[in-house]
Image (tube, coloured by chain):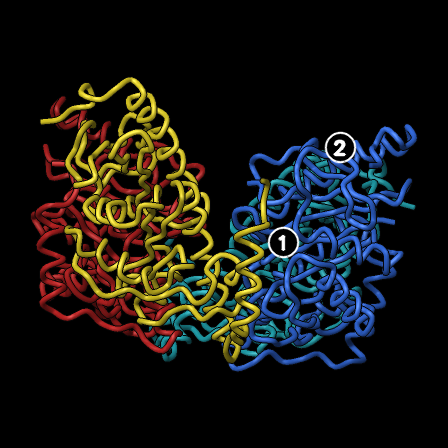
Chain colours: A blue, B yellow, C red, D cyan
Amino acid sequence: MVSLADYSDVVRAEVKQVREVVAGLHEQLLQWGLVVWTAGNVSQRLRSADLMVIKPSGVRYEFLTPQSMVVTDLQGHVVDGEQEPSSDTASHAYIYRHMPDVFGVVHTHSTYATAWAAAGRQIPCALTMMGDEFGGPVPVGPFRLIGSEAIGRGVVETLARYPKSPAVLMRNHGPFTVGGDAESAVKAAAMTEEVARTVWAAEQLGGAVEIAQKDIDSLNDRYQNVYGQH
Amino acid sequence: MVSLADYSDVVRAEVKQVREVVAGLHEQLLQWGLVVWTAGNVSQRLRSADLMVIKPSGVRYEFLTPQSMVVTDLQGHVVDGEQEPSSDTASHAYIYRHMPDVFGVVHTHSTYATAWAAAGRQIPCALTMMGDEFGGPVPVGPFRLIGSEAIGRGVVETLARYPKSPAVLMRNHGPFTVGGDAESAVKAAAMTEEVARTVWAAEQLGGAVEIAQKDIDSLNDRYQNVYGQH
Amino acid sequence: MVSLADYSDVVRAEVKQVREVVAGLHEQLLQWGLVVWTAGNVSQRLRSADLMVIKPSGVRYEFLTPQSMVVTDLQGHVVDGEQEPSSDTASHAYIYRHMPDVFGVVHTHSTYATAWAAAGRQIPCALTMMGDEFGGPVPVGPFRLIGSEAIGRGVVETLARYPKSPAVLMRNHGPFTVGGDAESAVKAAAMTEEVARTVWAAEQLGGAVEIAQKDIDSLNDRYQNVYGQH
Amino acid sequence: MVSLADYSDVVRAEVKQVREVVAGLHEQLLQWGLVVWTAGNVSQRLRSADLMVIKPSGVRYEFLTPQSMVVTDLQGHVVDGEQEPSSDTASHAYIYRHMPDVFGVVHTHSTYATAWAAAGRQIPCALTMMGDEFGGPVPVGPFRLIGSEAIGRGVVETLARYPKSPAVLMRNHGPFTVGGDAESAVKAAAMTEEVARTVWAAEQLGGAVEIAQKDIDSLNDRYQNVYGQH
């Protein structure tokens, strides 16, 4: 079996740093109210090798440390770590193998995003924030059983049809988000829940009013190319 | 009257340890927003004797300590402790006497689970997380007055008809959950509230879509037999 | 003008102790999510003199200290304190003058209790917790302008018709609660919001099912006479 | 390019003090649950020069410090600061140029206020708290794209028609609030979200009952002229 000792110093140094990043981002899931008990997981793919760092399975958040994070290859086989990796590991690995620009993946069961998923409805684009972040509606992916890479396939197939969206609501399950690193994917998870909750509340007031497509395109173009520190 | 001094060192050591566990788990009830003021209680049955450790009655959470927890026998008679035990003690005791695999019981009035109970509706199984944890809908139990073992009887009778569910929503009252220890029952209480809230929100979007029974069975089988560290 | 120096040592000692109690209970309003910014106020009547201690007007919660609390007589005239008392002072004073068993009064604009008040609907008694604490529905009081004792009169007149309830929802305004001391009134405020939220959520599931009156009476009798440490 | 060194000691001292105020008020946005991730921004106009202090663009809340705040002139040009100012800077500047009594501006995407904005509905005046703070309904402003002063123009035009309201709900976007300083604008943001949530919840109970205009006027007159410490 391959172990971390078979990798270079550079890789081992990146593993150490990414373990800290991924452990720290699980605290952000808690801070923004995206997870309960052990639900939800974050991973980040390495730049220096075809490896990823992911949460261990079924461990309570207060017991997560950088060292408890699990390192696997992009087939989901464990390379380093004392615990079993998340039961969503095969799906994270599938996403990394098929979306070469993605280096961070997050899965939660955050309440309102999951409610849209349970109702089988996409979130209509009724907020300028959605134009910015998602470039349109937040799409719904297919129903899939847990424990194989079938969920990852559903994520990849859905995002191929919605290339501007960093999020997909897996039917009867919950949101998966992707990004250029794990922090971007966590931000997308927080934004997905926020727009899910806001548009849900608008629906109870008689209905959210969708934004015209040309305005969505203007918002998305500015945000992806101008916003932030650069 | 029997006192803790009549028990062996082994039993007294387990009492000390379980008092710490049960006191600590009341903090988890607060952390996940399952209780307000003094509502809600956790108990755990001992392995070394027919005793249980339970929250005192009507005491605010910030004043709960391991030593303030009350030890009773499985008829609900106090064996050790300076305060009155929870007014639900007889029901906890009834559950332990009639469900020999159960070593933890939790009762809350968590908002959304109690809302389903007040509407007299079971929570339909519309989430993969429910397939995992509950193996179907979360059932509703009968209306019962407080203060006798009548509530415990209602819990046991309902769970006999829903053997995969660790939770029952007592009509007009709130959820009771059971587990192999108190932590498992607290986890079930947190999950019950989370699925209650999520499916409630899906109902406001036009209705939660239930999962097919064969898929529920697949999810439950995998989760109960494969998930977590083992 | 009368000042605290005109009172006995016993009274001055009770003022000091009650200032600490009332300041501390404002933190409980925050902990249970009952207030935003400066909204909401707590008072407690003294046992040793016809005086009360109440929150100053328009001061942010993080700046409240025991010493910032204002002492007034039961007409609402300031006896000690450097700041203006709450604009609800005349109403608190009216309640104490007309309800001799009440020694604590709390007013909040907690979200769901105030929503029922804005809809002009009483909260139907659909929870065993409501049978315990309120002995029936939580009643709605009349619309009243702010700044005089008119609100206090509305509270007293409504509670005369609902003598088992410690809470009244003032129409288009928010809840007032009373108790044997300020802590009991704060507990009633927390419980009012919790049942308001839970029954509100049940209404969205098709309707909360009310409990039969004879069962409400049984619950209330047991809770008021048996529950808690005694 | 103009720099802060071109200004007097008095101005530089006010910049230092306002940077601390504005940075500290971003924590209040978090405390009252008005923002997620980097959304939302606070600014304050100086008294000693035609300058304002505003949040940098796209920076997470835990990394905001007084020194990271950006100083711009009232055209939105940067005068001091190492980072890009908020992408809403031109709109804040427009508001200050056209509303000479306004010295604080806040923008959030707080959930329920934004839900009313997404549904294109003003919040009806159904709470005495709204009579106090808003003197009527909370109005809806026009749809505007992000990144120019167009949003600021929409805010100014809407508030000209609702001169008692410190808040406007920009359609499909979120609330902007104004005040005599940044703290007043943050208070208005917190109150806007609270009344948005409460009236939203009342709408789900069959409808919020609006207050008669003469009563709204009485409430607003008393509150604006009598309330608080003075």
Q: In terms of image quadrants, where is residue D87?
A: bottom right
The total of numbered circles placed on residues is: 2
The residue lying at 9 percent from left, 59 percent from top is C218
**Kind of residue sitting beneath label 1:** Val
Secondary element at image label 1: loop
Residue C88 position (above or below residue A65): below
> Nearer the viewer's eye, disc 2 or disc 1?
1
* Separation of marks 2 and 1 at Cα, in angstroms: 37 Å
Q: Which chain does tag 2 point to? A: D
In the depicted view, which residue is nearer to us: A13 or A130?
A: A13
The residue lying at 78 percent from left, 51 percent from top is A104
- Report x, y in % for residue C187: 26, 47
Which residue in the protein does label 2 denote?
D9
Which residue in the protein does label 1 denote?
D36
Q: Which chain does tag 1 point to? A: D
Secondary element at image label 2: helix
Residue B207 appears in the figure: yes
**Kind of residue sitting beneath label 2:** Asp
Residue D156 appears in the figure: no
The residue lying at 66 percent from left, 51 percent from top is A87
